[in-house]
Image (spheres, rainbow, N blue to C red):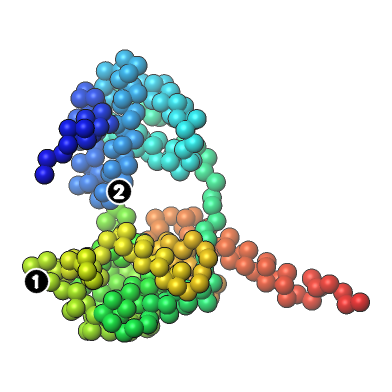
Amino acid sequence: MARPKKDQAKLTDSRAPAAFAGDIDGFIQFLQLERGHSPHTQAAYQDDLDACARFLAARGARDWRTAQGGEVAAWLHSLADENYSGASMARKLAALRGLAKHLVREQLRADDFTALLSAPKLSRKIPGTLTEAETAGIIEAAGGGGGAQALRDRAILELFYASGLRVSELAGLELQQVDLRHGFLRVFGKGAKERIVPVGRRALDALKIYLEAGRPHFEKSGRTGSELFLSGGPRGDGRALSRKTLWVLVKKYARRAGIEKNVKPHLLRHSFATHLLGGGADLRAIQEMLGHANLATTQIYTTVEEKRLIARHARFHPRNKDKEA
């Protein structure tokens, strides 16, 4: 179906001027084919670079190959009053740096125009987490009924908590990535990097039941492939569940369990890591299971555990209790 003329105009207005667009397209293609970045990252970088290019062109810049660092810095400074988070600003700078390095690598310009630009300082936000009882409550909330959808949803929640997967990773799981016999998943995370993630007994049991008694009810000839979790119900088409649907499922069962926290799939990932650390798991092992490139990213969970220990000490140590009258 043809795009309405008004939408076409909006799409054209949002793109970079032609003199800039070709280099952006080449860089985005490089991210896709060589670096394996997700479509979401590609789209975000595309939007950031298009916006910067429009700013530069409006101020007389010809193209990326002659753009100067000061001009790019002026664009970043122009965003100061738009309430972007530090993470968003860091992503915009990452997009610019990636493009600059790509142009130098392809010998399209001699220098890196982002060399003197500095990234904003990011505060490390301590991730929220669920208690073990809250997590169990969410999983149990999906266990009623015994129908195909209940079996699927129970398997999804068990697997989220047992593996610490990102929502995109779980949505993209295929049958051949699951080894029920040896109890692990073969996961392809950010940058298409492969990692092995062990899965606990309860999650394996839920998966086996779903595969035997649940998934066949969602399969539709000509539509169903090797995806692990399939859509069903009145609007189901037998294809893989979307990321959005997984978000909705997690929130639905959190409400059903009576949990007032803002529960998202990533909160189950945080809880997975925090509970493992609290149980004595090695930080390096947790890093590998989560698919973090740097240990520093995983170390944020030590802060959560420290706060938990301090709270327990304050509650239970006899010298912290009020003296009896």
Question: As shown in the figure, which amino acid type bears the numbered disc 2?
Answer: His
Q: Nearer the viewer, mark 2 or mark 1?
A: 1
Q: Which of marks 2 and 1 is nearer the N terminus?
A: 2
Residue 284 lies, with reference to residue 57, above or below; the image says below
Residue under the point 38% across and 81% down? 143
Residue under the point 31% across and 46% down? 41
Query: Residue 276: x percent and y percent?
Result: 49, 72
Residue 106 lies, with reference to residue 132, above or below; the image says above
Q: Mark 2 points at which residue?
A: 40
Residue under the point 28% across and 64% down? 171
Q: What element carries label 1?
A: loop
In the rendered structure, the answer to whether residue 147 lies left or right of residue 321 reads: left
Nearer to the camera, 278 or 325: 325
Q: Give the Cα separation between the discs numbered 2 and 1.
A: 30 Å
Seen as rendered, the residue at the extreme top is 60
Residue under the point 24% across and 37% down? 27
- The numbered dot on residue 290 is none
Nearer to the camera, 147 or 22: 147
In the rendered structure, the answer to whether residue 184 lies left or right of residue 252 reads: left
Q: Could one spot residue 136 in this view of the protein?
A: yes
Q: In which quarter of the image is the C terminus?
A: bottom right
Query: Residue 88: x percent and y percent?
Result: 43, 41
Mark 1 neighbour class, 10 Å CA radius: few under 14, some 14 to 19, many 20 or more: few
Seen as rendered, the residue at the extreme right is 325
- The numbered dot on residue 221 is 1
In the rendered structure, the answer to whether residue 301 lies left or right of residue 92 reads: right
Q: Is mark 2 on a helix, strand or loop?
A: helix
